Amino acid sequence: MTVPGLLIVISGPSGTGKGSICRCLLKRRPDIFLSVSATTRLPRAGETNGKEYHFKDKTEFEAMLAQDEFLEWASVYDNYYGTPRTPVDSALAQGRDVLLEIDIKGALKVKQKAPEGIYIFLVPPSMEVLRTRITGRGTDSMEVISKRLGKSMEELSYLYEYNYVVVNDVLEEAAAKVESIIIAEKSRTHRYRIQSNAGPEEPLLVEKDLKNW
Ligand code: ADP
Ligand code: 5GP
């Protein structure tokens, strides 16, 4: 029997560095499966369809919605974003740990469906640093930037819905913290069952399928 992988959800205000942390984490841990969301947002320079996102128009996205193809979806800054359900379910079923990088509304919806997941909230070291990062990304208009900054303070209040918080100051250090959280989560006692009838060369502990336990 394959024990399902861990569902790891990273979210936090726009521009805190979720995308950067995920890329850094995946370099350290290429075994983790990154869910690629669908969005109606237009691709930014350098983004490729199927890599950062599956870029859809509104009609295509609504057709996916009608077919119940999303684990969760949300309207974020006037665009739709959604997590396709099938790739996530199959990767978890194959025992792979799955990473979702989604907004706060979406994360809370996933938490209701999958409370056994781990929920990590990423915050910037300060509002000034956040402003510099969003502006420095150079991909959004001034109007979008001020909308996103305005919402960030309000979004911080969702911190306590999450299991962990990571301050994204130095990128490599923050990614290492996320990796440590994953390692610690996988070492928690409640994930294991003692195999009392184990043979001399068999493992003493086996991982539990927490969903079906
Ligand atoms: P999000 O995915 O949360 O919207 P991004 O990963 O796109 O955020 O990061 C926003 C901007 O901040 C990008 O230009 C990115 O290069 C920069 N950035 C992210 N993390 C750091 C960091 N720790 N130090 C300096 N710049 C960072
Ligand atoms: P961006 O347009 O900067 O790539 O993303 C905007 C916001 O949408 C970010 O907070 C990002 O995490 C979030 N997002 C990306 N994909 C999804 C998704 O599938 N579902 C939800 N709910 N949010 C998403």
Image: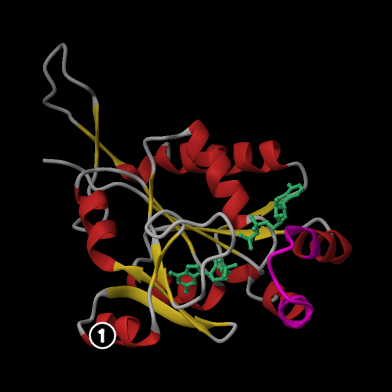
Q: Check mark 1 vs ligand 2: CB closer than 8 Å? yes or no.
A: no
Q: Secondary structure at mark 1?
A: helix
Work out which quarter of the rendered image holds the C terminus and state it. Answer: bottom left
Does 142 appear in magenta?
Answer: yes
Q: Which residue shows up at 18% across the image and 30% down it?
A: 195
Please indicate whether residue 126 sits to the left or right of residue 198 in the image. right
Please indicate whether residue 97 sits to the left or right of residue 136 in the image. left
200 relative to 5, above or below: above
**The image quarter in which residue 46 lies:** bottom right
Where residue 48 appears, x then y in whole percent?
45, 56
- Which amino acid, by three-letter code, is at mark 1? Ala
Q: Nearer the viewer, residue 143 or 20?
A: 143
Q: Which residue shows up at 51% across the image and 57% down it?
A: 47
Where residue 10 appears, x then y in whole percent?
53, 58
Q: Nearer the viewer, residue 167 or 40?
A: 40
Please indicate whether residue 100 sits to the left or right of residue 16 in the image. left
124 relative to 57, above or below: above
The colour scheme is: secondary structure
Q: Main secondary structure of the magenta part?
A: helix
**The image quarter in which residue 40 lies:** bottom left
Q: Which residue shows up at 51% across the image and 32% down it?
A: 28
Circle 1 is placed at which residue position? 63
Work out which quarter of the rendered image holds the N terminus and state it. Answer: top left
Within-10-Å neighbours for mark 1: few <14, some 14–19, many 20+: few
The segment highlighted magenta reads 135-151
89 relative to 176, above or below: below
Where residue 147 appears, x then y in whole percent?
73, 83
127 relative to 7, above or below: below
Q: Which residue shows up at 48% across the image and 70% down it?
A: 107
Does 195 appear in magenta?
Answer: no
